[in-house]
């Protein structure tokens, strides 16, 4: 920790220890910083580690079962998510719920949903590398706290943010990979499926159907054994 950051310890206007919480990008977010998602969410809602914090209505932290066996990671909130503070509640979220329901996966029992970035980028652009780097430490804390058996990375931004893999999603979707000892699979982003509605064999929606069935099978294997 640099000495100017350490000196904030002596700041008598800041007597609350939570003022040392790293909502400033100069201060790293060490693993183990948070005891629970509520604490983390409080910080995300005060965060200015990147410029996206300046325009948010709500930080969008996550929704679903806090001990879910599957964590699904998207890109960043859109308008509906910024307004409600909940991830994937707009059109792509509705499609996502249908995809999950097709194999009996629910956010009540099986899934926790989060994003690479907690704040909405202007005009729904993809977050840039600095914005991603500023926010990913919160996500790593969420992964540690939820401790999922399986991580689903929806879309290229989620794949890049977690694994660093820059290959296109069509190349890597549907394959199991290991990251930090956890099983992960890249899947199409639901907004891509909204733009590609054909259900013909080999098309993105059909491929998603193969992938989500493989996820269901893997979860069953992991929970039976
Ligand atoms: N797209 C995402 O990647 N995340 C959301 O929360 C909503 C749309």
Image (spheres, rainbow, N blue to C red):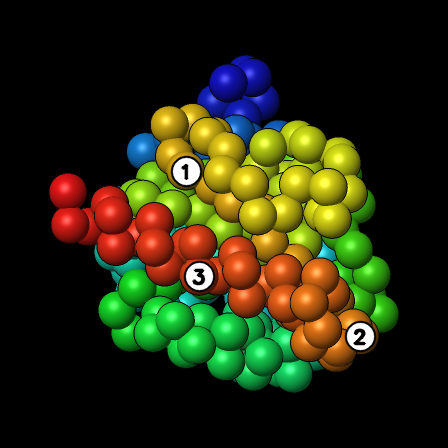
Q: Compared to 121, does 3 lie above or below? A: above
Residue 195: image tag = 2
Name the mark nearer the viewer: 3 or 2: 3
Point out the image quarter for the C terminus.
Answer: top left
First in sequence, mark 3 or 2: give its number.
Answer: 2
Residue at 43% x, 77% y: name it.
102
Residue at image mark 3: 213
Q: Secondary structure at mark 2?
A: helix
Q: Secondary structure at mark 1?
A: strand
Where is residue 91 shown, x and y percent of the image? 65, 83
Q: Is residue 80 visible?
A: no
Q: Is residue 84 left or right of residue 65?
A: right
First in sequence, mark 1 or 2: give its number.
Answer: 1
Residue 183: image tag = 1
**Neighbour tally class for label 3: few under 14, some 14-19, many 20 plus, Cα within 10 Å:** some
Give the distance between the C-alpha atoms of the residues marked 3 and 1, in whole angstroms: 15 Å
């Amino acid at each position: 920790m640099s000495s100017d950051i350490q000196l904030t310890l002596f700041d008598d206007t800041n007597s609350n220890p939570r003022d040392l919480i790293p909502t400033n990008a100069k201060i790293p977010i060490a693993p183990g910083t948070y005891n629970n998602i509520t604490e983390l969410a409080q910080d995300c809602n005060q965060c200015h580690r990147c410029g996206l914090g300046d325009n948010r209505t709500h930080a969008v932290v996550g929704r679903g079962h806090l001990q879910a066996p599957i964590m699904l990671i998207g890109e960043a909130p859109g308008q509906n998510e910024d307004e409600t503070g909940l991830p994937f509640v707009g059109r792509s979220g509705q499609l996502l719920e249908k995809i999950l329901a097709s194999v009996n996966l629910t956010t009540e029992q099986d899934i926790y949903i989060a994003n690479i970035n907690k704040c909405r980028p202007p005009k729904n652009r993809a977050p840039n590398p600095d914005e991603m780097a500023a926010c990913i430490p919160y996500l790593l804390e969420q992964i540690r706290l939820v401790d999922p058996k399986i991580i689903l990375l929806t879309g290229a931004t989620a794949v890049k943010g977690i694994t660093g893999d820059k290959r296109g999603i069509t190349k890597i979707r549907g394959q199991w990979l290991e990251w930090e000892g956890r099983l992960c699979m890249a899947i199409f982003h639901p907004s891509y499926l909204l733009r590609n509605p054909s259900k013909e064999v080999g098309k993105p929606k059909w491929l998603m159907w193969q992938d989500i069935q493989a996820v269901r099978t893997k979860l069953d294997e992991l929970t039976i054994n």
